[in-house]
Image: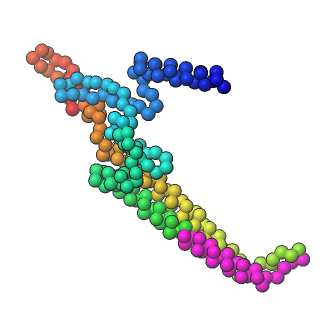
Amino acid sequence: MKRSLFLLLLLFAVATVFAQTYDAVMPGQKKVTTVDSTGNATTQIVTDYDSEYIQYRSGGSWFYKGQTMSKDEFVSKMKSECTPAYEQFQRGVRQKRAGIAMAATGGAIFIAGLSVWAWGASFADEDFAGRFIWNTPMYAGFGVWMAGLALGFGGGATCIIMGSHKQAEAHQVYNSQCARKEQANNYELRLQSSSNGIGLAFAW
């Protein structure tokens, strides 16, 4: 056990040294190249604390610039800064509400069907083994019962899951459409002439 722990620590140390020596990007990091006003390009590795992008964390929270955002904080930011992301989040909210309504309706239908089935079973005949011989109310109750299950657990649960998924991924819309992009994404290499001759220059 101690040997395994030692090997894991050694591997982590080697990976860290490798990352620092060869400018490698570790998990949770990325390389960002920025260009200043004089045209000098600088490449550095940034972490969540430096990133302009939002990450979703399991449990219903978001992470931005080293801080955890609650749902209310996230929605407020999307509403004020990114209409497409806010609209997707709201679509998820509406879909979840529809799913909850379907689940509640399905549950009521399920109980009604079960009640009808039980009522039919209360006066149903029995065979020689003591099993019910199904009558019309029992068949009808069973049909209503299954319809309630399909609506509540099929439709309702599906809408709730899909709505939650839309809410959770609203940050991706923000990252792709509204986040301030690093200058590395906004410059290009051009052929440019000057008093010293012709050369390559960055433009943005």
**In this image, 1 relative to 44: left or right?**
right
Q: Main secondary structure of the magenta part?
A: helix
Percent from the top left, x then y, of residue 33?
30, 28
In this view of the protein, can residue 25 be seen by the observer?
yes
In the image, residue 118 sits, relative to residue 80, either above or below, namely below
Q: Is residue 161 left or right of residue 198?
A: right
Location of residue 52 by image quarter: top left
> Which quarter shows the N terminus?
top right
Q: Give the residue drawn at x 57%, y 24%.
A: 8
Task: Residue 136: tell me if it is visible.
Answer: no
Q: Is residue 114 located in the magenta-colored stretch of the structure?
A: yes
Q: Among all residues in the image, which is located at the extreme front? A: 2
What is the magenta range? 104-128
Residue drawn at x 90%, y 77% is: 128
Q: Residue furthest right?
A: 128
> In the picture shown, does residue 71 fall above or below 134?
above
Using residue 40 as the reference point, say whether residue 65 is left or right of it: right
Q: Is residue 26 left or right of residue 45?
A: right
Residue lying furthest top in this view? Answer: 196
